[in-house]
Amino acid sequence: MPDLRKRLEDALAQAGSASSDFDLNADVKKPDAVLTPAAVLIGICAETETVILTKRSARLKHHPGQIAFPGGKQDPTDATLTDAALREAREEIGLPPVIVDVLGELPPHQTVTGYQVTPVVGLIDGHYDPVPEQGEVSEIFEVPLAHLLEPRNYLIEGRRWQGRRRLYYTVPFGPYYIWGATARILRAFAERMA
């Protein structure tokens, strides 16, 4: 773990720039809107060197069935974005904040849906029993950090959206199709770790 911690700390100490869902789509103008603050947890299990991700419930109105980090918008009760990420991780997957050693944040990511998402990087040092929040999460799983740090695992794909072809990053893993904001944030993280 000391080597992993050092690598993460070194990566977080480097300068980085914000990312967005618009990075691969220069023809799409970013909206001039006030963005809603949100945060996600890039939770890395120290013992297994894996990253915790979730599959969103198919019953959700927004992004059903998609792969995501634990996280969500900042509530008035959250003093900081880190507090928001830790609260959401506790609510969505049962992760106790006391076993998360927060190492820092990545630059924010602007989503096409109007959120400014701050990725919070934390080492999870200890065992916990994952408990999916039934209304939001259908599955909790882990992806090897090595898979997510390998540049060759990232692909650029596209689909039609609002009358035009929209490009986005993907980083598939087994049966999981990781794409969109989650894949873009992971790619920015991988670039910092390189």
Image (cartoon, grey):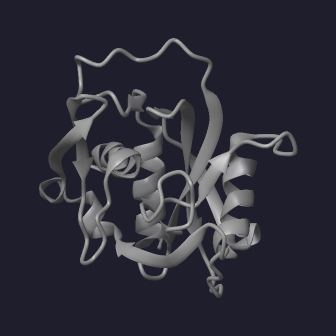
Vertical side of 131 occupied by 32: above or below: above
User: Is residue 16 visible to the viewer in this orientation of the structure?
Assistant: no
Observer-nearest of 158 and 51: 158
Farthest residue to the front: give it.
163
Residue 24 appears at what percent x and percent y? 23, 30
Residue 45 appears at what percent x and percent y? 50, 74
Residue at 28 percent across and 64 percent down: it is 177
Observer-nearest of 160 and 3: 160
Residue at 62 percent across and 66 percent down: it is 136
Residue at 25 percent across and 41 percent down: it is 168
Observer-nearest of 173 and 127: 173
Locate residue 181: give its quadrant.
top left
Vertical side of 96 occupied by 130: above or below: below
Residue 178 appears at what percent x and percent y? 32, 60
User: Is residue 140 visible to the viewer in this orientation of the structure?
Assistant: yes
Q: Is residue 10 left or right of residue 171?
A: right
Vertical side of 46 occupied by 153: above or below: above
Residue at 42 percent across and 65 percent down: it is 4
The count of marks equals 0
Q: Is residue 119 left or right of residue 127?
A: left
Farthest residue to the top: give it.
32
Residue 28 appears at what percent x and percent y? 29, 19
Farthest residue to the right: give it.
77
